[in-house]
C-alpha cells in the first residue's frame, strides 16, 4: 500500500489524482489532503477517502472544515497554514506526495517533501522554475524521487531510456521536442489580443485546467515555464530544447536522438494518464482514460512558434539564459500579472508588458539559497503590483 499526500487536492490535478486513486483502493491509501479555501469540496473528499490529515489556508477555513467533518462523524485531523502543509508533505507516514498546489505557494511543502526523501509527483512547475538547482540538489542529497506529472515532461520521461542520468549528450539525445497546443489564440489576429477577456483566455481547446495555467497557456508562458522545467528535470541546456506547436495535443512531447530516431508518447489529452504513469512507475495501471483512436483523429499538424505573437515564450528563454534568480522574477511577475488580468485590472497583452518590465528593471542575483529566491519573489511581486497600478484601466 502506497500512502499518499495530495497538496492541492481540490484543484484540477488534485481531482484527477483522486479519480485515479479511487480505481485502485488495493494499491493506494490517502494520508493527507490539502486545499486553500474550497472547504466544502475538501470535506466531501475527506468523506470519500478518509485521510488522517486535512490542511487548509486559514484558521477560519480550518474551523469550518472541522465542523463539517464532525457533522459527518469523521476523525480527520485538521490544520492550516504553510507549516502544516510542510508537515503532511514530510511526515514519515506518507511515501508519495502529489505536488499540485498552483504557483509559488507550493514551493515550501514540495521542498519539504524533497528534504524528507519522498517520492514526489511534480505538477507544480512554478516551484521548480523558481528554485531550480536548489530544488534538484535537495532531491539528490536526500534520496527523493522526482517524477514529472506535466504531460510534456511525463512524455519526455517515458521517451528517455530508463537509466537516463540527466545527461542528454551521454544518452545520445539530439533535441527535446516540447509540444505546445498554442492555446486558444493560436490563429487569432494579433491586434485583437489586447481586448480578449479572462473567460476567452481560459477556454483551452484541448485541456480542462485551473484558471492560472489556462491563462499561461493562452500567453504561452506555460510553455516557457515548461522549457525551464525541462532544463532542470532532464539536465538539458536551452539550445537542446525546441518548442513545436502541435494543435491536437495528441503527441505530448518527443525526444530526438543522434541516430535520427524520434521517440514520442501519444495519448488522449487527459491528465489522468501522466498521473497514473507516475503513481505506478515502473508498472502500469488503468487510469480511466479511453484508448487513443488515431484514425478518428486523422491528421496531426506541426508548426514553429511565433515569438512575436507569444512574447512570454521569448521572456522565459531569456530568463533561463540569464540564470540565477531571473526565473524566480519571471515566475512571480507572471503570477501577479495573470491574477490582475483574471480580476479585469489589466488587459491580456499587459501581462507580457508587466513581466518584461519586472525582468528588465530588476537585478537578477545568484540563487544562492531558498531565502534569496523567496526575497527575489517578494521583490518581483511588489514591482509588478507597482507597474500594474500605473496601467490599470
Ligand atoms: P487549480 O487552480 O485547479 O488548483 C490549485 C490547487 O492549489 C487547489 O487545491 C487550491 O486550493 C490550492 N491552492 C491555491 N492557492 C493556494 C495557496 N496559496 N496555498 C495552498 N494551496 C493553494 O490548479 P491546477 O490543478 O490546474 O494546477 C496545479 C498545478 O499543476 C499548477 O502548478 C499547474 O501549473 C500544474 N499543472 C496543471 C495541469 C492541469 O491540467 N491542470 C497540467 C500540468 C501542470 P482551493 O481549491 O481551495 O483554492
Ligand atoms: Mg504541460
Image: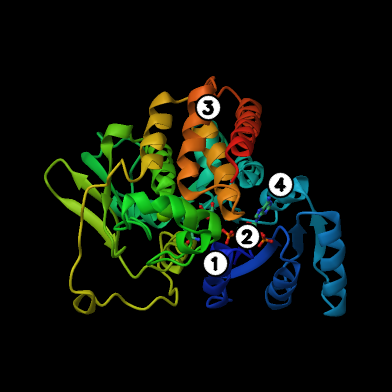
Identify the residue at horizontal 88%, vertical 71% (top origin): 67
The residue tagged 1 is 17
In this image, 222 relative to 249: left or right? right
Of the image marks 3 and 4, the number of the one nearer the N terminus:
4
The residue tagged 4 is 86
For mark 4, does the 10 Å Cα neighbourhood hold few (<14), some (14 to 19), or many (20 or more) residues?
Answer: some
Of the image marks 1 and 2, the number of the one nearer the N terminus:
2
Q: Nearer the viewer, mark 3 or mark 2?
A: 3
| Separation of marks 4 and 1 at Cα, in angstroms | 20 Å
User: Relative to 36, is 285 above or below?
Assistant: below
Q: Position of residue 64 (x, y in %)?
A: 85, 67
| Separation of marks 3 and 4 at Cα, in angstroms | 23 Å
For ligand 2, give the image quadrant. Answer: bottom left
The residue tagged 3 is 325
Q: Helix, strand or loop at disc 2?
A: strand
Identify the residue at horizontal 64%, vertical 65% (top origin): 10
Mark 3 in CB contact with mark 1 (< 8 angstroms): no
Would residue 190 be seen by someone viewing this image from the given angle?
A: yes
Identify the residue at horizontal 38%, vertical 66% (top origin): 205
Amino acid at each position: 500500500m502506497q500512502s499518499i499526500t495530495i497538496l492541492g487536492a481540490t484543484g484540477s490535478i488534485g481531482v484527477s489524482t483522486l479519480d485515479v486513486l479511487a480505481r485502485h483502493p488495493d494499491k493506494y491509501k490517502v494520508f493527507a489532503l490539502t486545499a486553500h479555501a474550497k472547504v466544502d469540496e475538501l470535506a466531501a473528499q475527506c468523506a470519500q477517502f478518509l485521510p488522517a490529515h486535512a490542511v487548509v489556508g486559514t484558521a477560519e477555513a480550518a474551523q469550518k472544515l472541522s465542523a463539517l467533518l464532525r457533522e459527518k462523524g469523521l476523525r480527520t485531523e485538521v490544520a492550516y497554514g504553510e507549516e502544516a502543509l510542510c508537515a503532511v508533505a514530510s511526515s514519515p507516514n506518507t511515501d508519495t506526495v502529489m505536488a499540485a498546489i498552483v504557483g509559488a505557494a507550493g514551493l515550501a511543502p514540495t521542498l519539504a517533501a524533497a528534504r524528507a526523501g519522498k517520492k514526489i509527483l511534480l505538477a507544480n512547475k512554478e516551484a521548480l522554475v523558481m528554485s531550480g538547482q536548489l530544488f534538484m540538489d535537495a532531491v539528490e542529497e536526500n534520496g527523493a524521487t522526482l517524477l514529472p506529472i506535466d504531460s510534456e515532461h511525463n512524455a519526455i520521461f517515458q521517451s528517455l531510456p530508463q537509466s537516463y542520468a540527466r545527461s542528454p549528450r551521454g544518452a545520445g539525445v539530439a533535441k527535446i521536442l516540447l509540444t505546445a497546443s498554442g492555446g486558444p489564440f493560436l490563429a487569432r489576429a494579433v491586434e485583437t489580443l489586447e481586448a480578449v477577456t479572462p473567460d476567452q483566455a481560459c477556454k483551452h481547446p484541448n485541456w480542462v485546467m485551473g484558471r492560472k495555467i489556462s491563462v499561461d497557456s493562452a500567453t504561452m508562458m506555460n510553455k516557457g515555464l515548461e522549457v525551464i522545467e525541462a532544463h532542470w528535470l532532464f539536465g538539458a541546456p536551452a539550445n537542446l530544447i525546441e518548442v513545436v506547436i502541435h494543435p491536437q495535443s495528441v503527441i505530448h512531447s518527443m525526444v530526438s536522438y543522434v541516430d535520427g530516431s524520434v521517440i514520442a508518447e501519444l495519448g488522449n489529452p487527459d491528465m489522468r494518464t501522466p498521473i497514473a504513469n507516475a503513481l505506478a512507475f515502473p508498472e502500469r495501471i488503468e487510469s480511466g482514460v479511453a484508448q487513443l483512436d488515431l484514425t478518428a483523429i486523422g491528421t496531426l499538424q506541426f508548426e514553429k512558434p511565433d515569438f512575436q505573437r507569444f512574447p512570454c515564450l521569448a521572456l522565459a528563454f531569456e530568463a533561463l539564459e540569464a540564470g540565477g534568480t531571473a526565473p524566480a522574477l519571471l515566475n512571480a511577475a507572471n503570477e501577479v500579472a495573470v491574477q490582475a488580468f483574471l480580476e479585469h485590472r489589466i488587459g491580456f497583452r499587459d501581462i507580457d508588458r508587466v513581466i518584461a518590465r519586472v525582468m528588465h528593471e530588476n537585478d537578477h542575483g545568484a540563487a544562492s539559497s531558498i531565502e534569496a529566491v523567496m526575497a527575489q519573489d517578494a521583490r518581483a511581486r511588489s514591482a509588478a503590483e507597482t507597474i500594474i497600478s500605473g496601467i490599470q484601466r
